[in-house]
Amino acid sequence: MAGLPGPRMDSVTRELVRDLKVGGVILFARNLEGPEQLWELTRGLQQEALAATGRPLLIALDQEGGSVQRLRASFTPIPPARELGLSATPEQVELLARQVARELCLVGINVNLAPVLDVARGPQCPLWDRSYGPDPERVAALGVAAIRGYLAGGIIPVAKHFPGLGDTVSDSHKELALADSGQASRELDLLPFRKAVAAKVPAIMTAHLLVKEWDSRPATLSWKILQEHLRQELGFAGLIITDDLEMGAIAKELPVPQAAREALAAGADLLLICQDWQAAWDAARLLAQEQGLAPRGLEAAARLKNLKETLQPGGAGLSEVRDYFRSPR
């Protein structure tokens, strides 16, 4: 899953979709100008993907709420998860997620990288405002409600960040986060993910997190964490997506292509490279040379194919998009 240079179907974007055949794309502010432009972009992306592979693209963004809300003007505002955790009911969170899902579907988005299931212990945690709070039962209840709402609205939700960044004080965008609770079981952090798996969440994102009690490798690159804990202990059979492999927690130690190789070997199915499209090409070339990873790659591709088969066909027309976003709500 790669980032794109800009808001239009330029030559770089076409090559990523048509020639590299990326499994998905992720959109940021640089790709977004408004509902009509976004509809045009996603429509063009899907046309290119279907012509090249016969399968649709996963088109994702972060529409969590609060400070992490890529679509703002004309779209329903989403309170920070911290605020929802203090006052909202699960029913209200589910209803809000349905509304957000409707708007994302209108403009051609089919994946929301949300909800955040990290159980933030306090303001020292970098995810404090992005977390539903310090109570794992509360985080689980609201997270599952959001998952239900997104699925009902036709959007693939991605629960993040496994196995939980709630007991950290370092920002993994800058450096490797260290789990600080000292709890070998991590049951407090795992509970929301257990409930999400039981609710059939289709995808989970990894954390660039070091859990010394579990492994000497970050979760994103750890076979033990992704296979023994997520697959076996929690029984998750869906798609594992890495967090951005260009983040400081990983990139300070490994070039992006090498990180992609190690993440795939560890059990990740979709490798997220948000900024440097050339790094996506380099990663693909390296993976193609790794014959020993071919079975793992086929397994990942099968999971990606299965997820894409759940995507709802069709989509809104441009006139419907114009009418919706011009109407007061």
Image (cartoon, rainbow, N blue to C red):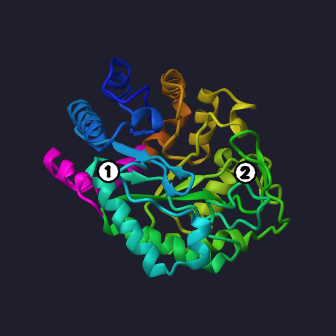
In percent of width and height, residue 55 lies at 26, 41
Badge 1: how crowded within 10 Å, few (<14), some, or many (20+)? Answer: some
Q: Residue at x 68, y 77 (%)?
A: 135
Mark 1 = which residue?
Answer: 308
Q: What SS does tag 1 mark?
A: helix
In percent of width and height, residue 275 lies at 53, 30
- Residue interval drawn in magenta: 301-329
Residue 306 in view, yes or no = no
Vertically, is 49 above or below 139? above
Query: Which amino acid does the dot numbered 1 rest on?
Result: Lys
Vertically, is 280 above or below 190? above
In percent of width and height, residue 200 lies at 44, 69
Query: Which amino acid does the dot numbered 2 rest on?
Result: Leu
User: How far apart are the alpha carbons under marks 2 and 1?
Assistant: 28 Å
Quarter assignment of residue 150:
bottom left
Mark 2 = which residue?
Answer: 209
Q: Residue at x 57, y 78 (%)?
A: 87
Q: Residue at x 29, y 35 (%)?
A: 41
Residue 65 in view, yes or no = yes
